[in-house]
Amino acid sequence: MVEKVVFINRSSKVVKGGRRFKFSALVVVGDKKGKVGMALGKAAEVADAIKRGGELARNKMQSVSLNDVTIPHEVYSCYGGAKILLRPASPGTGIIAGKTVRSVLESAGIKDILTKSLGSKNAANVVKATLNGLLSLRTREQIYTSRGLEIKKVAVPKAPQASAV
């Protein structure tokens, strides 16, 4: 399991004796085989917030449809003001993404992808938009079975062999 802390937020409450701080940690967890989850853990200490976020994220893990180490098709996803564009890439391209989107994609096990984050830079909304995009992906086999169709095997024509002269 890969656990990545995406963002840590500190909030304070002013009381008679001074300020009381609380922390929230946005954590993404994945198995690098197509399962990924995210959660927001809150606590009085940073370490406790990260630990709680990791536990919650493990409980919320969901499966993502992958095509080897990239995604099956292009997808555009929104959550709040965050907009994410995910495009499949050829082998060897790597993950072309910002740090927030990258943490989700690496946790899911994606190695070749092109992304663009548009709109809001709010880390929580960017992570949720990325997850929504990944969860909306479907492979050709899933689409065919949902429509009740069979995938036809196409015979590949053989190239003519050159005779030795």
Image (cartoon, helix red, strand yellow):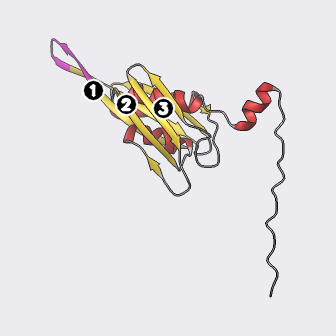
Q: Is residue 143 magenta?
A: no
Q: In the image, what residue type sits under mark 2? A: Leu
Marked residue nearer the N-terminal end (2 or 1): 1
- Asked if 42 appears above or below 111 in the picture, the reply is above
- What residue would you read off at disc 3? 130
Residue 57 appearing in the image: no
- Asked if 59 appears above or below 106 in the picture, the reply is above
Mark 1: few/some/many CA within 10 Å (<14, 14-19, 20+): few
Could you tell me residue 65's position as x and y percent? 64, 37
Query: Please, what secondary structure does the residue beneath circle 3 have?
Result: helix
Residue 118: image tag: 2
The answer to whether marks 2 and 3 mark residues whose Cβ atoms lie closer than 8 Å is no
Gap between marks 2 and 1 measured at Cα? 26 Å
Q: Quadrant of residue 49?
A: top left
- What residue would you read off at disc 1? 10
Q: Which residues are magenta?
A: 10-19
Q: Is residue 16 magenta?
A: yes
Residue 97 appearing in the image: yes
| In the image: residue 155, left or right of residue 130 | right
Could you tell me residue 138's position as x and y percent? 66, 33
Q: State the residue lying farthest toward the front.
A: 165
